[in-house]
Structure formats: C-alpha cells, structure tokens
Image (cartoon, coloured by chain):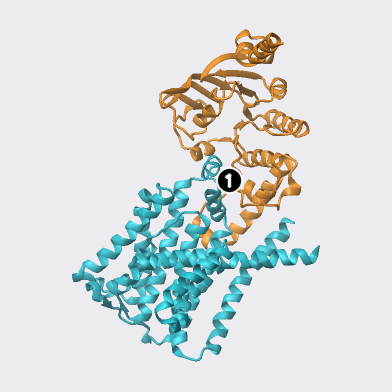
Chain colours: A cyan, B orange
Amino acid sequence: MSVFDTVQRVVGNRLSLILIGAMLLVLPLLMTSSFQMRLAVVVWVYAMAAIGLNLLMGFAGQVSLGHAGFFGIGAYSVALGPSQLGLSPALSLPAGIAFCGLLALLLGRPILKLKGHYLAVATLGLGMLIFMILSNEVELTGGPDGMRVPRVVIMGWKVKGTETWYWITGIALLISVWLALNLINSPTGLALRAIHDSEVAASVLGVDVARYKLIVFVISACFASAAGGLLALYNGHITPGVSDFLVSVQLVTMVVLGGMGSVGGSLVGAALIIILPQFLTVMHEYEHAFLGLIMILTMVFMRSGIVPSISKAIRSRRHDSNS
Amino acid sequence: MTAILETDGLSISFGGLKALDNVNLSVRPGEILSVIGPNGAGKTTLFNLISGVYKPRSGKVLLEGQDVTGQSPDKLAGRGLTRTFQNLQVFQTMTALENVMVARHLHEKRNVLAHLLALPSVRRQREETRKRAMECLARVGMEHYADQTADSLPYGALKRLEIARALALVPKVLLLDEPAAGCNPRETEEIDEIISKIAAEGMAVVLVEHDMRLVMKISNHILVLNFGKKLAEGNAATIAADPHVIEAYLGLEGDEGEAGAVAE
C-alpha cells in the first residue's frame, strides 16, 4: 500500500508537470492575437507569485497581505541593478531574488511571531512600506513615473518579443511548480502542514515552528520577487504600481479562489483574476461588480477553492461508481 | 539507576492563582510515574511546564541531570522528551501514517535546498521514514489505518495515534496526558499493554490518568496533586491507604454517601 502510495505520488507530481508543459505547448497554436499571448505571459508570472504565496498560506497557514512588496522589489531590482550597480539585467534577476530573500529573512523574524489578524496587518504594513519607498525615492526609482528596464542580452542575442517571453516565463512557471511540489512532498512540506494543523503538537514532536515559518516566508518572497523581476524584464518599464496593496490582495485572491494548498489551483486562480476582467469589459461600468459577484459565488459554492472542490467532486463520483 | 527526569520546586500562577506550587518529582528509565488528583489539581499544567509549553515562574526541570527549564518544546524533543495531549492534538488533514512521519523529523536530514530540488537522497530517506512510521503504527495496532485521514478515525484510534506519533520520536521520557480518557474497557486494556511494553523497553513514562484501576495496576510510583500542591506520594498500596488522599479524592464519594443517607 505504501509503495503504491509513493508511486502514485511521484506519478501525480510528474503528471501535473506534464499537463502544464502540454498546455504551454498547445496554447500558442490556439491563440489568435499577440494580445492573448501577452495575457498568457502575465498569467504565468502572477501564477509564480501565487504559488509561492500558497506555500505560505495553504501549507504553513500563515497569511501575507504584503507580497506585492516582494513582487515590487524583484521588479525594481532588474531596473536598479543595471543603473546603480552596473550589473547586467540577466544577472540582476538572481541578485534581486537573493536580496529579497535576505530582506524576508530579516523582516520575517519579528513579523512571524504574530498570529492571524495581527500577522495580516503587519504584512500589510510591510507591503505598504515597500510601495512608499518605491514611489517616494524619486532620485533612485523615478517615483510614480517609474523607470526603464534595459533589455536582457545573452551572448549578443537581444531577448525581446512577446513569443520569446512566453517561453521564458512558461519555463519559469514550470520550474516554480516543480520546486513547489518537491517542497510539499518533502519532510519540510510535512512539517509545514503539521504547523498548520497544530503548532503545539508540531513543536513537541521536534519541529522548530519559528524556523519553518521563516523558511517558507523566505521561499515565498523569493517566488514573488522572481515573478516581479520577469514581469519587469518583459515589460521593459516598471512603476511602483506593481507593489501596490491591491496587487497583494489580488495574489491572496488567486490563492484562495484557486484553492489553498493546491499548486494547480494557484495557476487557475491567477488565470481567472488576470483574464476574467478582459472578458468583463463588455459590461462597462459593471465590470468590477460582476467580477466581485463571480468571486462571491465561487467561494460560496466551492468553499475550498476551485481546483480542490472539482477534484473532490470527481473523486466522490468515481467512488460512487465503484461501489 | 539515577533519575532521567526531575523537577525541583516547580511553580506557576495564573492571575494570582497558584496553579502549581513547589512540585518535585523524579522518574527513572523504565519507570511509570502516575500523577493523579481531582480536576484542576494542576496535572496538565505540570505537563505544560515540563514539556516547555509554559515557562515556570520558579523551580527547575532537569533532564538527564541537565537544567532544561524554560527550553522550547522542540529543543526538549531533541533531548528526548515528548508528550501526548488530553484534548487530542492530531494533525487532522494528514493520514495516520503522515501524522507519525512528522515525528521522525528530528531523525531526518533537514536540508531545505535538497528538499526543493528533490535530490535522490531525500527520496531514499523518505522511504526509511515511512518504514519506521509504519513500525510505530504497528506497535499500537494501527497499521490498517495508515492511509486514512485522521479526521475520519474513531476517537480510540486517535488516542493510540498520538502514542504512536510520540514513539516515532524515540523519546527517553514520554508524558502521557489521559491516554485512556473516553476509551472503553477493551481500549483501556490495549493502552495498558502499550504503556507497560514501552516502559519495559526502558522508557520513562509519566502518566496523568483518571482511570484508577489502570493507574493502580501499572504505576511504579504515584504522585497525588491537590490545588497545585503535592498531597501524597508513594506506591499504589500507600496511596490507596493514605487518609489525605481518601479525603481529597475518594472522600467526596463518602460525603455524598452520607448526605444521601441523611436524606433518606
């Protein structure tokens, strides 16, 4: 039974990767405009950030309303790296991720001592602080007007064009999914789930609760900054808006709507939040009202999020037909 | 043999109320020490102080002769002390097997980078952990529940699951908080067997329990608490004959009996 379980789990992991890979390959054939492809790039990037946030929220059970701050730091690091430090844009991306991870390590230590609503408010403040710095340090960041992000050049090849970025961000998304699934199925993932279910039981069994919260906070911040950096490199221009509070809310919504604790759910959630408003533009001034209505209905009828609810329904149907 | 766990003058108060007042205990490897007393006597508080969930206001906890007072629960787990909970703290969303696997945490390499990259060593270690966890489930007779999620298990099974989980840590000292509470006589018997067996293997067991038949049967030593203070201490025979204990504990029934007689 246990061997079968392991086999199923490994195949299950591979299957999600194969499915997402297949989707990446097939989608360009179905797309009719470069606008759709642009949208796909944005979805992949936000999905990366949402997957990182899901590790924190869905597995460790810790909320963050400030993840757009890390997204913004990643975005600005690919602009500031070249202009301030003379780094190449391609090198600025990993440097930005490392910086963001370090920052999360330092700030996470005091913040993660808080629980529930207090943690939510503290992370909210952290995100706002980063937004304020990015908007107000005009000398450095260009203020609300934002700043230009130089093109990535790899061995003389100028990386540009939406199709190129479709593949780059698509592969980045695949790597993110792979890393997240690995973590979830590792002892670290089990420790995080234990913390989510009962902190006191986890700690008497030897899990250093504070350390694991910090680790997953840092990892999720790195995911967000990688996503922000890629979006900035693709757009070629960046404004403080990427780290706005509303982006943090969007990220949380993606995680919850798609399904807490479901990596595929975060991708679905990101796709919905990015694409749905495009369809709803026909509603004109009622666009946001409809978006809100759809979100409310989804949460009422699919309480555990879209992907977990659907897979649960399929499983119970299969169970019924077996018996 | 010298004591593996000792407390020295352990005290704590909550809002002016002395929940625990100057409690000393000592338990040796292979020994079963039972802590009994009426509700609110401070038994669970004692466990919370020893296991690091609360910090004592004064007094010391010594583990293998070393002062470990105020250390966090995970540090104490690393030193070989763990516990179960009166109001079950099972990981509800996990399977029984996964619950036990969590407790193998300290026996695994905890390299997060290796976990992120799913290195082959992580997978090998995972199989080892799974095997060990399965053995622990088998020790409490729960191997057939391995793949069921905890929230679908019956109450008695959850009680045993907590014990299996604690055993997976391979502790030197195990604190059991009312392991037989809410169990039927047959389940209580099973728990009796499990506890006797682990003590026979050399583990020190501290037991909080209301089932007097179980306590009298398996304890090497009994500590009676009342209003946070030690009331009596000794083996089963001494405790059963102690006038203070009878008054504080069993005496209640006597009073009721008399009251009933008067009413008649």
Q: Residue A86: which quarter of the image?
A: bottom left
- Tell whether B138 sits left or right of A226: right
Q: Position of residue A222 (x, y in %)?
A: 41, 64
Quadrant containing the N terminus of chain A in the rendered view: bottom right
Residue at the image position 53 percent from the left and 23 percent from the top: B6
Looking at this view, is A177 or B28 the one in front? A177
Q: Considering only vertical position in the picture, is B227 above or below B114?
A: above
- Tell whether B14 sits left or right of A2: left
Q: Position of residue B61 (x, y in %)?
A: 48, 26
Residue at the image position 47 percent from the left and 51 percent from the top: A212
- Tell whether B164 sits left or right of A138: right
Give amino acid for label 1: His
Residue at the image position 62 percent from the left and 23 percent from the top: B33
The residue lying furthest to the left in this view is A139
Q: Considering only vertical position in the picture, is A76 above or below A260?
A: below
The residue lying furthest to the right in this view is A323
Q: Position of residue B139 (x, y in %)?
A: 73, 40
Q: Is residue A258 visible?
A: no
Q: Find disc 1 in the rendering and name its residue.
A: B107
Quadrant containing the C terminus of chain A in the rendered view: bottom right
